[in-house]
Image: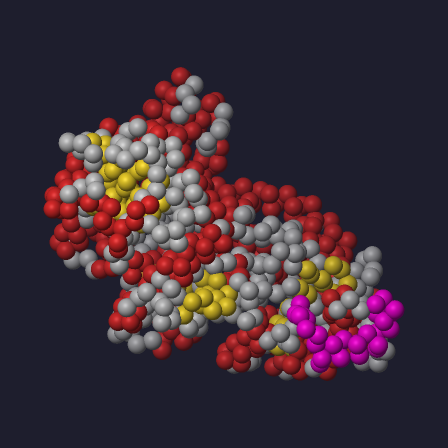
């Protein structure tokens, strides 16, 4: 992991397999910076992106109103199609998307016939040259006239085709929280309001408001007032520095770091208006007054004490005495009781100096070991150490962050979010909340905000109410509203200066309405990119995958049934977590030592893991047992090598069958794996000079078109010629799971070792080889000529052929719109070859006999060869 500023350190000659650029919109913005060094940083990123085999860009930036930055991001993906100097052309494409998106918002499954017909006319006009879409439109017209139940299917096909063909970039995936609400909980992090009890607060509020009413109504004084407003809403040491800088006409580097050069220049260079110096001197005098209680840091400590008192179940009589409560909690922290797990508190402030003061104050109260920080000026290594200590050390339960901790941090394991002050930018607050409001976050995260004195006309309280009720930021993410929010700040600053609290409160309803309109515009833009995620097949696939993943106990039972019960690995539990374990080979493990060294070399058997994804999310040092994890991949590799279970023989006792000698049924169970033959597609890979990773991609794609399938066929071996079993009663007996000795009415016996002689009573040992060969040949012929199999095969082949054809048509349409794109032309050429090869491989699939079993069915037990204690 590297910071963007350090990318130049990477050797430009080294081969890079994959690059992931987080917060890619920040990197994209560098492309048009006025600073040459920043532009060079973008060039370094661009070189890295274009050089790497794979590139993943992560960004929550909407396209609308961010065309220049979005163009720069797409340029990193595809420099041929998305040229940095073609902003006007890109803006035109975005505008056309708006029109398409407006149609697609109402053209969806379940829409009324009149709405569908109206939108069909617009779609025909928008895509007059798209023959495939026009055919789908004609099909939909016919279905609408017939009031067919297949209307939704064609509507979905049209929407998906438009998305795949006309989206800004076919490899751009966009999801909003609303479409994954089952993965990310609805945001509900409205803070509890805590008011200052500092006796200076009222006087400070009145003096600052006096300054506002007397100051000239000019932009530079408006900017100065914003600084006074923000500085009075945090640790008052910041306000003292702002006032001193205003009085003296100069500021030190600490204040520049807090507000930036431009704001501090306006603060110090703007002429003082008549009477201002007296007002500021009065303000400074009040700030420097000694205060007995109620100072904001003390209020923060009181919040923490009250929550800890509730956690430790300290009696109310003790809680009423602050000093006694503090002593009691200090003792409990120093001498914890068994099972004490302190809640994790994250405290945010917008100011670096405030952060340092909070850390010092809380360290004095609870001990240095209990507090970690994320501060400007700290080295990256120091920050990482602090974050790890907060996360992993149970005694460290407070993390204090300035604005440097508001991006790029995953703090979803925390229990509390405390806003020591509120930033001026709602986008900054969104980032702050987003540290805890993430996938895998705890349910019921609590929050509070310190918002100044309890006054009806408090601008700090009004600002909080505007954030809560106007922007709705504590109930929903506003990440997609970044541009709207940035544009709104100038108006909000002017309102704050001219009308203070009353003006901010009047902005609540207009902002609510404007956000609704903005969301509609964004939805129109996103309609093209979100269709894939909203496709019914995709939704069902994700739902099935999510449902399966939630059954972690069943997954554990299945895996341990093989690795522990069959192979003989010993489960070792983690002493700290019930759900965590690892697997250790012993002298009883049924894996040869050489195979254990070779096939389990990368399985990290000494590392603990869990089957519970949520637990793994909270504890990244604990691996998750799923496909792709080292141990499971080793097991899969070993199963494919191990031939146990590929051939078996059983005596199946079922009391519903005739128990007389000579009345037994015997035959074979044949399990066939049917999948695409990839030899034709492999040749295309060789001819196109594509690497091995392309083969893995091809394999996944082919499996999606024609999923590998297991077909089971039962063969009656009693007569010549052998025949397929179709009798329902017999099939029910043959298909049931293996039954052990505890089920007396339906018991199965493994015909191994001395029991193998039982088979000789049914098939002459000298004829056994030919008998098995005949069964294999007959089962293959019966399967491939079976009407049910042929119907399934034809449906799968037709579906794959249609999807391959659609893919080629989409590429042709893109190339028609981008005839200069030689990479796209080459892709179409290779894709045409692949489509033909894949289809040939599907039409001539591999049909492999994966496992076979010889089964005898009887109404009696094979007593002659069985001891009561045997299975």
The residue sitting at 28% across, 40% down in the picture is: 856
Read off the magenta span.
315-343
- At x 68% / y 73%, what residue is drawn? 338
Q: In this figure, what is the number of numbered marks? A: 0
Q: Which one is in front, 145 or 793?
A: 793
Residue found farthest to the front: 864
Residue 190 sits above or below residue 770 on the image: below
Q: Is residue 835 left or right of residue 288?
A: left
Q: Measuring from the top left, give residue 474's x and y in whole percent.
A: 65, 54
- Residue 564: give x, y in percent of width and height: 41, 62
**Is residue 361 left or right of 27 when viewed as pictured?**
right
Q: Does 371 appear in magenta?
A: no
Of 261 and 130, nearer the camera is 130
Residue 824 at least partly seen: no
Residue 126, picture quadrant = top left
Q: Nearer the viewer, residue 103 or 770?
A: 770
Q: Is residue 585 visible?
A: yes
Does the magenta-highlighted stretch encompass residue 340?
Answer: yes
Residue at x 41%, y 64% (from the top left corner): 21
Tell me what residue is drawn at x 35 percent, y 38 percent.
860
| Residue 109 x, y percent position in the rendering | 46, 31
Locate residue 431 relative to residue 496 in the image: left or right. left
Q: Is residue 557 above or below residue 235?
A: above
């Amino acid at each position: 992991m590297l910071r963007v500023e350090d990318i130049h350190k990477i050797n430009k000659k080294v081969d890079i397999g994959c690059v992931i650029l987080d917060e890619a919109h920040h990197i994209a913005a560098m492309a048009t910076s006025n600073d040459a060094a920043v532009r060079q940083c973008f060039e370094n990123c661009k070189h890295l992106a274009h050089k790497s085999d794979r590139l993943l860009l992560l960004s929550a930036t909407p396209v609308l109103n961010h065309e220049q930055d979005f163009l720069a991001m797409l340029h990193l993906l595809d420099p041929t199609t998305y040229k940095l100097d073609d902003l006007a052309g890109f803006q035109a494409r975005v505008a056309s998307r708006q029109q398409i998106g407006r149609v697609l918002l109402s053209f969806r499954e379940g829409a009324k016939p009149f709405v569908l017909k109206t939108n069909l006319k617009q779609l025909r006009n928008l895509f007059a040259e798209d023959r495939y879409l026009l055919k789908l439109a004609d099909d939909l017209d016919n279905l609408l006239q017939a009031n067919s139940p297949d209307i939704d299917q064609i509507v979905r096909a049209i929407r998906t085709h438009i998305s795949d063909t006309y989206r800004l970039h076919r490899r751009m995936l966009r999801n909003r929280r609303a479409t994954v609400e089952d993965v990310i909980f609805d945001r509900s992090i409205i803070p509890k309001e805590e008011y200052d009890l500092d006796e200076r607060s009222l006087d400070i509020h009145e003096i600052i408001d006096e300054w506002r009413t007397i100051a000239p109504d000019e932009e530079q004084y408006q900017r100065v007032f914003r600084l006074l407003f923000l500085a009075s809403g945090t640790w008052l040491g910041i306000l003292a520095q702002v006032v001193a800088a205003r009085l003296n006409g100069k500021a030190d580097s600490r204040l520049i770091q807090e507000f930036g050069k431009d704001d501090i220049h306006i603060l110090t260079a703007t002429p003082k208006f008549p009477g201002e110096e007296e007002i500021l001197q009065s303000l400074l005098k009040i700030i420097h007054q000694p205060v007995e209680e109620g100072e904001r840091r003390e209020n923060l400590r009181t919040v923490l004490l009250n929550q800890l008192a509730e956690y430790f179940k300290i009696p109310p009589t003790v809680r009423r005495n602050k000093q006694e409560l503090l002593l009691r909690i200090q003792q409990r922290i120093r001498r914890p009781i068994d099972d004490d797990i302190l809640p994790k508190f994250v405290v945010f402030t917008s100011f670096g100096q405030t952060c340092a003061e909070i850390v010092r104050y809380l360290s004095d109260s609870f001990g240095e070991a209990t507090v970690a920080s994320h501060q400007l000026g700290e080295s990256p290594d120091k920050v990482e150490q602090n974050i790890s200590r907060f996360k992993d050390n149970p005694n460290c339960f407070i993390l204090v962050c300035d604005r440097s901790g508001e991006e790029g941090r995953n703090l979803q394991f925390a229990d509390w979010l405390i806003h020591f002050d509120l930033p001026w930018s709602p986008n900054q607050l969104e980032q702050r909340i987003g540290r805890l409001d993430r996938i895998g976050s705890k349910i019921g995260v609590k929050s509070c905000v310190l918002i100044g004195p309890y006054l009806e006309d408090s601008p700090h309280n009004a600002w909080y109410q505007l954030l809560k009720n106007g922007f709705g930021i504590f109930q929903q993410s506003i990440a997609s509203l970044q541009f709207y929010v940035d544009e709104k700040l100038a108006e909000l600053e002017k309102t704050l200066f001219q009308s203070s609290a009353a003006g901010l409160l009047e902005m609540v309803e207009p902002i609510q309405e404007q956000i609704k309109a903005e969301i509609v515009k964004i939805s129109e833009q996103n309609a093209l990119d979100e269709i894939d995620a909203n496709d019914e097949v995709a939704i069902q696939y994700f739902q099935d995958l999510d449902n399966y993943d939630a059954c972690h106990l069943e997954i554990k039972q299945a895996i341990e049934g093989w690795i522990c019960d069959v192979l003989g690995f010993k489960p070792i539990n983690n002493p700290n977590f019930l759900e965590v374990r690892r697997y250790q080979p012993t002298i009883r493990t049924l894996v040869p030592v050489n195979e254990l060294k070779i096939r389990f070399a990368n399985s990290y058997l000494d590392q603990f893991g869990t089957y519970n994804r949520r637990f793994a999310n909270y504890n990244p040092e604990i691996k998750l047992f799923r496909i792709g994890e080292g141990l499971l991949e080793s097991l899969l590799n070993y199963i494919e090598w191990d031939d146990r279970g590929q051939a078996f023989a059983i005596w199946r006792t079922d009391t519903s069958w005739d128990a007389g000698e000579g009345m037994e049924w015997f035959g074979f169970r044949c399990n066939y794996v049917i999948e695409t033959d990839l030899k034709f597609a492999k040749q295309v890979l060789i001819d196109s000079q594509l690497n091995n990773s392309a083969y893995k991609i091809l394999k996944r794609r082919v499996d999606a078109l024609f999923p590998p399938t297991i077909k089971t066929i039962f063969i009656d071996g009693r007569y010549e010629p052998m025949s397929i079993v179709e009798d329902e009663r017999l099939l029910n007996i043959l298909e049931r799971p293996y039954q052990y000795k505890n089920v007396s009415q339906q018991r199965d016996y493994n015909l191994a070792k001395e029991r193998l002689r039982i088979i000789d009573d049914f098939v002459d040992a000298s004829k056994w080889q030919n008998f098995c060969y005949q069964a294999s040949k007959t089962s293959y012929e019966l399967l491939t000529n079976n009407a049910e199999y042929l119907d399934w095969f034809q449906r799968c082949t037709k579906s794959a052929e249609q999807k391959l054809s659609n893919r080629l048509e989409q590429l042709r349409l893109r190339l028609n719109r981008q005839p200069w794109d030689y990479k796209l032309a080459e892709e179409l050429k290779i894709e045409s070859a692949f489509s033909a090869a894949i289809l040939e491989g599907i039409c001539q699939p591999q049909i492999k006999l994966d496992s076979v079993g010889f089964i005898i069915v009887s109404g009696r037990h094979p007593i002659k060869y069985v001891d009561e204690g045997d299975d």
